[in-house]
Image (cartoon, rainbow, N blue to C red):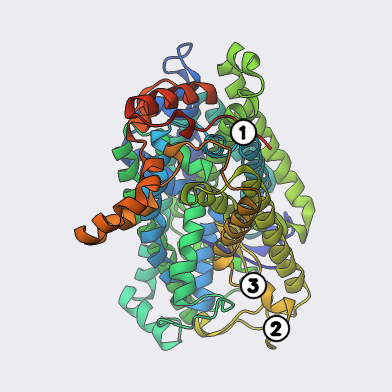
Amino acid sequence: MSVGVSTSAPLSPTSDTSMGTSTFSLVDYVVFILLLVLSLAIGLYHAFRGWGRHTVGELLMANRKMGCLPVALSLLATFQSAVAILGVPSEIYRFGTQYWFLGCCYFLGLLIPAHIFIPIFYRLHLTSAYEYLELRFSKTVRVCGTMTFIFQMVIYMGVVLYAPSLALNAVTGFDLWLSVLTLGIVCTIYTSLGGLKAVIWTDVFQTLVMFLGQLAVIIVGSAKVGGLGHVWAVASEHGRISGIELDPDPFVRHTFWTLAFGGVFMMLSLYGVNQAQVQRYLSSRTEKAAVLSCYAVFPCQQVALCMGCLIGLVMFAYYQENPMSIQQAQAAPDQFVLYFVIDLLKGLPGLPGLFVACLFSGSLSTISSAFNSLATVTMEDLIRPWFPEFAEARPIMLSRGLAFGYGLLCLGMAYISSQMGPVLQAAISIFGMVGGPLLGLFCLGMFFPCANPPGAVVGLLAGLVMAFWIGIGSIVTSMGSRISPPPTNGSSFSLPSNLTVATVTTLMPSTTLSKPTGLRRLYSLSYLWYSAHNSTTVIVVGLIVSLLTGGMRGRSLNPATIYPVWSKLLALLPLSCQKRLHSGSHSQNHLIDGELFSKKLRNGVLGDSRDKEAMALDGMAHQGSNPTCVLHETSL
């Protein structure tokens, strides 16, 4: 996951090409159009291959036969948006390399999903991640989680389509709505017709284009300024190489602890419980392949982060020797990279087009993943359980219609984004606000057997209220702050009015020189702690409400939905201690002993929750367990 940077003042659409000199040649246009044509061709190939024999499982889950590498590259591409490609270099250029330490959080942020979330989801043979919430809690909790996710993605996907097109229009004069419509239509066609398999394979192609575009900028840029060694020396001389800032203050925007540990929760909300990612894990042909794909994302994420940071350093070194144009000096930070690339690659036909293709590959991969995941949760969580006859009548047409409908909705949201003005900041930030409460909801179910449906619903609502309170308060505070010159080193400078960020997009706040107090202090909480803060709120409130309402007394519990925390901790102790504690842990071990049940779920062809209940009863009977340990439908 990468975080991009944008200004606190949104851009205004313009067709005035005087803001930047368009250096697009015929070759550049050919390279850019080639990206769109090949993406569409890959999608249509998978759409028409076996036309008439497609199943819902193929459209939504790629028949659960995907290999490790394509899944890994698709996982990377899903949240490596165009805004991140523009934002990371701008962050490094303005504030130094402290942000680079975000790479430290990738290890735990991917290791935990690989060994906790993926095994549970995969063994339950889910299609929608929110189906887990019904198996663990109730249908009410499932619907609440699904609606929260839909709200999150619908708000965000229009912005991720509109914002890069707007930045490109302002710098190159590239027609704004032509690029928005082209991307939206191409993406909608191959996603709705080709399903998840088409999305994954186009993600693979688009990931390679993203890497090639960024690599071209690094090679040409470093060659023009005297090599990467000289780039590093210039950045170090001007204080852009940050040391390890060990300040534990969570209100400092970027410190080592904030990036390395606060970032873990943000990674978990993305790679642990987000439907767009979970759907890719579950499309793997085996559980081992799903885990390996999660492992494979780690080096890919490190490479993507390094490339973004190196572009920022090369850009800084370049402008120490070459003065900026008046337009660039007055430009928004998210336009810095585009101005730099146009300036750097002019006279090299094809390379500006390659970088624009790189930029729009990020948009295509993110938007197509959003379409597909939204169609899946709508089909599985809102239509199939409530309207089974309707869902089974024409499932293929319904699945494609949902993806197509969300594509049109994305274009509508892009238009609304253009009319939002300052509210655009809030729209982007919503994506980040919602991720933490959803993470907390899943953790509440997996790690706390005493949590019940009322606790889950109230906990989720409390987490969302807390997220929006701090997030919107941060936005309002930032709008009222005066803009100060950027610090020379972001690692040692506290930005007291942090604007909440989307998980893949950080909006840079305005800053004040005075230290905030009272509620302003709370609003300045570093955006990287948002997921941790909000998910903790869900867990704490959920546990309190669960205990006040009797816990799981009178309700049955599905053992396959609980992660065996106690037995895992027990296994770390010496054998003598394990024997001494064994008798006290009998009930907990009984609760989590569901391996046969998990295997049956994994190997069976399952439909709604009643099918899974029957499988669970059968599994418990073979284990000699009490069948009442299995979840039945319990609603609020």
Q: Secondary structure at mark 3?
A: loop
Vertical arrangement, residue 524 with respect to residue 385, above or below: below
Q: In terms of depth relative to the viewer, which is nearer, 368 or 612?
A: 612
Whether residue 388 appears in this view of the structure is yes
The image quarter containing residue 283 is top left
Of labels 1 and 3, earlier in sequence is: 3
Q: Residues within 10 Å of mark 1 (few under 14, many from 20)?
A: some
**Residue drawn at x 59%, y 17% as measured from the top left:** 397
Q: Amino acid at mark 2?
A: Pro
Q: Earlier in the sequence, mark 1 or mark 2?
A: 2
Residue placed at 74% from the left, 68% from the top? 473
Q: Do residues under tags 1 and 2 come within 8 Å of each other at their CB atoms?
A: no
Q: Residue at x 65, y 79 (%)?
A: 496
Q: Is residue 307 left or right of residue 527?
A: left
Circle 2 packing at 10 Å, graded few (<14), some (14-19), many (20+), is some
Q: Where's residue 468, x and y in %?
A: 71, 59
Estimate the x, y position of residue 591 in percent, counting from the top left: 41, 42
Which numbered circle lies on residue 498? 3
The label on residue 516 is 2
The CA distance from mark 1 to mark 2 is 47 Å
Q: Return the residue at label 1.
A: 634
